[in-house]
Image (cartoon, grey):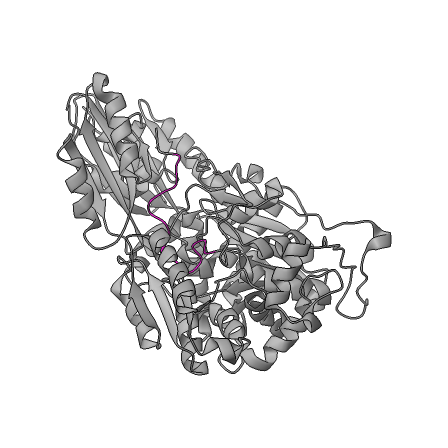
């Protein structure tokens, strides 16, 4: 069984749980079960997936009322609780008393208004562009808020600069520090150079050179420390105390939130907000969606604020569901710009007030969204930057599947915030490979046909009209042939599920034929498609799929730990250009030593999944 403890492969990203000095003690542990469904990869049962709706209703007599002019079409129904005396004092140490509400919380409207006087010293008003292709396909007007066009290619510059611009010069001259290897690090380094404040950026020793070189180029003093982010965060905290440096948090700070909130302010000068139905934002630690949501809900409460998360990094969805902050045991690393183990304390309080829904998307859906943005803009955004578009597409699809009216949305506007574009070029290979599956344009199939003359011809006849994207076969027995192939689905998006169902029925109708849709099977997509070559009859063979951090010599270290103890009968690794690597390995282990092997694998500390009983393993790699 896979380990349920914390993964060693913590995200090397600017949102990796550095909660403004807190240790997450107010949060509870939680883990989301694997939601992939190999029997339904193209949306047939997506109607049952979580698309939580947050109701913001309250006692009408107690609601703070927003003036109902051309913008505010409904009441803003929020009654935040009064912070404790201890929390109130903590807020006062950060926010001047003039910028506090009577209940003790920050007055974010005033903070955002104040931020506009400083943020644009470093940031620019990003364009709100019409996504023509996406609009035509979804039959609603889609606008992209292009935060990927900021000087550091991410919205993070807004919050970092606003926080640093409001520091007391009597303290800031000593310098600032942050722990990050992503967009937040670049935002802090750029802001420090602009404000002439010394900046130290702490990163793990295994951080890819391109990341720490970019930060150094922007003017930050990079310190590489420790094997992972936990060690780097400890070093960051040590420098705060030892050198009297000021920590710049990535999201859980009123000035950071207000800086991101200037995006909401810009929207009102760029489009008619009375025609906007919803705004989609990646969730991450919550700073972006909290800042935008606070402003939009006060000025145009009818606009839905919809958070989008990856299914394997859904801290906000779980926290809203449980009513308290949840700390994930493990976090998927593909959407690294939004990979957090827990949302911030202040951002969670705000999200409970302003977030209407949370939509969760798969890695493949995020890849498809990156392609959609590219088709409309000829620009490649990072996975977190594509989350908002992926969420919009899934939101519209689920509405149609639930039978909810969508015709009224044809005259409405949807806004997606493309939050950033800091992606390594090597990752584009993986994105391109997965985009067609995430968009429902490609299916991967495992077909069993009788090993007899004309069987191949009958299979080709059955799939006629569907372009084949890949085809793998090797003789294995006199009775049955196992074939792995991919093909393109050519029907309109809303009809592809039916198209695939019809195709599967047509294949099964052939005598002796059987077929399984493996489009959402991670083992199939990451490994089996590259390994089809002949079965083996190795005795006592067990198959495992590992995720491990992509840092220098990590693969060699993994092999060095594994090989002395056990015999490896299969090994497959493919670099996809990301921060996490995938390994498929088979280990020979008699039943009497199974417990010893399980303990050994758990002690390694890398997330893994046993695939010994996988039908694909038995069909293609076992005799």
Residue 76 is inside the magenta segment: no
Residue at (18% x, 36% y) in the render: 562
Quadrant assignment for the C terminus: top left
User: Dividing the picture into quarters, in which one does residue 182 lie?
Assistant: bottom left
- Residue 273, by quadrant, is bottom right
Residue lying furthest front: 242
Is residue 253 visible in the rendered image? The answer is yes
* Residue 521 image offset from top left, x and y in percent: 36, 37
Q: Is residue 474 above or below residue 371?
A: above
Q: Is residue 615 above or below residue 575?
A: above
Q: Position of residue 62 (x, y in %)?
A: 83, 54
One can see residue 455 in this view:
no
At x 72%, y 52%, the residue is 81
x 81%, y 68%: residue: 67
Query: Looking at the image, which is closer to me, 273 or 507?
Result: 273
How many marks overall?
0
Closest to the observer, 210 or 429: 210
Furthest-right residue in this view:
61
Relative image position of residue 51 (x, y in whole percent): 59, 44
Quadrant location of the N terminus in the rendered image: top left
Left or right placement of residue 57 versus residue 195 in this view: right
Task: Give residue 518's position: percent from left, percent from top.
Answer: 36, 36
Q: Which residues are magenta?
A: 4-18
Residue ID at (25%, 42%): 583
**Could you tell me what secondary structure mostly forms the magenta stretch?**
loop
Q: From the viewer's perspective, is residue 529 above or below residue 366?
A: above
Apparent side of residue 282 relative to residue 474 in the rendered image (left or right): right
Left or right, residue 214 beside residue 288: left
Is 533 rendered above or below residue 333?
Answer: above
């Amino acid at each position: 069984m896979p380990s349920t403890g914390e993964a060693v492969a913590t995200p090397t990203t600017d949102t990796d749980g550095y909660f403004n000095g807190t240790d997450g003690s107010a949060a509870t542990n939680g883990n989301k079960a694997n939601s992939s469904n190999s029997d339904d990869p193209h949306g047939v049962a997506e109607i049952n997936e979580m698309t939580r709706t947050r109701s913001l209703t309250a006692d009408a007599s107690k609601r703070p009322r927003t003036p109902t002019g051309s913008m505010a079409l409904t009441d803003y129904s929020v009654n935040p609780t009064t912070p404790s005396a201890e929390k109130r004092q903590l807020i006062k140490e950060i926010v001047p008393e003039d910028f506090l509400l009577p209940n003790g919380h920050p007055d974010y409207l005033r903070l955002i208004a104040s931020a506009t006087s400083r943020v644009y010293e470093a940031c620019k008003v990003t364009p709100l562009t019409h996504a023509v292709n996406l609009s035509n396909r979804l039959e609603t007007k889609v606008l992209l808020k292009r935060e990927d066009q900021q000087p550091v290619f991410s919205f993070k510059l807004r919050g970092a600069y606003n926080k640093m611009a409001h520091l007391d010069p009597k303290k800031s001259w000593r310098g600032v520090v942050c722990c990050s290897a992503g967009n937040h690090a670049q935002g802090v380094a750029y802001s420090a150079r602009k404000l002439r404040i010394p900046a130290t950026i702490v990163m793990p020793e295994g951080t890819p050179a391109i990341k720490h070189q970019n930060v150094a180029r922007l003017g930050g003093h990079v310190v590489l420390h420790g094997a992972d982010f936990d060690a780097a965060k400890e070093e960051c905290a040590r420098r705060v105390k030892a050198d009297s440096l000021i920590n710049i948090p990535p999201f859980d700070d009123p000035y950071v939130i207000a800086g991101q909130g200037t995006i909401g302010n810009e929207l009102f000068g760029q489009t008619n907000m009375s025609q906007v139905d919803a705004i989609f934002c990646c969730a991450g630690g919550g700073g972006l969606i909290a800042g935008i949501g606070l402003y939009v809900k006060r000025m145009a409460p009818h606009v839905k604020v919809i958070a989008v998360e990856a299914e394997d990094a859904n801290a906000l969805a779980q926290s809203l569901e449980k009513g308290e902050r949840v700390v994930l045991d493990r976090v998927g690393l593909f959407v690294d710009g939004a990979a957090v183990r827990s949302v911030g304390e202040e951002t969670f309080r705000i999200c409970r007030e302003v977030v209407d829904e949370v939509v969760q998307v798969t890695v493949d859906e995020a890849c498809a969204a990156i392609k959609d943005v590219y088709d409309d803009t000829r620009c490649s955004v990072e996975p977190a930057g594509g989350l908002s578009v992926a969420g919009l597409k899934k939101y519209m699809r689920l509405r149609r599947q639930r039978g909810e009216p969508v015709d009224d949305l044809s005259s409405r506007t949807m806004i997606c915030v493309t939050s950033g574009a800091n992606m390594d070029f090597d990752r584009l290979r993986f994105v391109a490979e997965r985009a067609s599956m995430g968009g429902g344009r490609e299916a991967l199939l495992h077909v069993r046909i009788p090993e007899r003359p004309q069987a191949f011809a009958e299979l080709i006849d059955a799939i006629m009209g569907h372009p084949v994207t890949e085809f793998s076969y090797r003789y294995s027995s006199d009775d049955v042939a196992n074939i792995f192939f991919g093909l393109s689905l050519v029907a309109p998006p809303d009809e592809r599920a039916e198209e695939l169902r019809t195709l599967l029925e047509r294949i099964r109708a052939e005598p002796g034929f059987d077929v399984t849709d493996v489009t959402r099977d991670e083992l199939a997509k990451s490994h089996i498609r590259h390994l089809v070559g002949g079965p083996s009859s190795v005795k006592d063979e067990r198959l495992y799929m590992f995720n491990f951090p992509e840092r220098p010599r990590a693969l060699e270290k993994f092999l060095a730990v594994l090989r002395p103890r056990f015999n490896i009968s299969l090994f497959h690794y493919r670099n996809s250009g990301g921060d996490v690597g995938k390994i498929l390995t088979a280990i020979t282990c008699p039943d009497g030593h199974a417990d010893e092997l399980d303990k050994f694998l758990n002690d390694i500390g890398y997330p893994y999944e046993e695939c010994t009983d996988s039908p694909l393993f038995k069909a293609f790699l076992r005799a």
